[in-house]
Image (cartoon, rainbow, N blue to C red):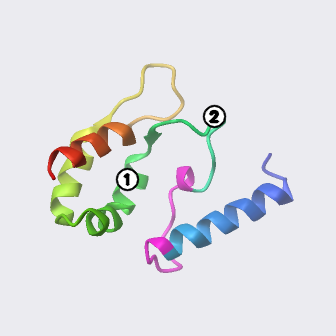
Amino acid sequence: GPTSATLAAQVQARAATFRAAHQLAPQVAIPADMLLASGSGLDPHISPAAARIQIERVAAARGVDASIVTALVEQQIEALPKGQLESPCVNVLQLNLALDGIQ
């Protein structure tokens, strides 16, 4: 829970790793879904903010222009079915398949 010292340490470690991987300045906010794990660890959805913050890294890793990745991220934004907690979202599996299709 929110008072767990273990969880706080895990979040801090994830933030440091994420910040380093994306070369983020200390004042840049990291989307919460990049710091917390889903219950199953298999959820294919992330927030649009989480997808957008990774565009430069994904573009570099795939050797494509960031504008192409940006366009695909924006195309992949969808609403979760009614009753879900987070909406809108990006299905990472579908985004990766779209990225695979341009190479």
Q: Residues within 10 Å of mark 2 (few under 14, many from 20)?
A: few
Q: Residue at x 63, y 34 (%)?
A: 40
Residue 17 appears in the rendering: yes
Which residue is rendered at x = 83% and y = 58% of the image?
6
Task: Kindly identify which residue carries mark 2.
Answer: 40
Q: Amino acid at mark 1?
A: Ala
Badge 1 crowding class, 10 Å Cα cut-off, few under 14, some 14 to 19, many 20 or more, is many
Relative to 4, 34 lies left or right: left
Would residue 91 be visible to someone looking at this image? no
| Amino acid type, mark 2 | Ser
Q: Magenta segment: does it hold 42?
A: no
51 or 42: nearer the viewer: 42
Q: Where does residue 20 sit, x and y in percent of width and height?
A: 51, 76
- For the stretch drawn in magenta, what is the main secondary structure? loop
Residue 92 numbered tag: none
The image position of residue 84, as x and y in percent, is: 51, 25
**Along the line of sight, which residue is nearer the eye, 92 or 74?**
92
Q: Which residues are magenta?
A: 21-34
Place residue 35 in its image quadrant.
bottom right
Res 62 quadrant in image: bottom left
The percent position of residue 102, horizontal first and vertical second, equals 14, 49
**Residue 51: which numbered mark, if any?**
1
Who comes first in sequence, dot 2 or dot 1? 2
User: Which residue does the image show at 69% across and 67% down from the upper left?
Assistant: 12
The answer to whether residue 9 is above or below residue 43 is below
Q: Nearer the viewer, mark 2 or mark 1?
A: 2
- Classify 75 as above or below 103: above
Horizontal and vertical percent position of residue 4: 84, 53
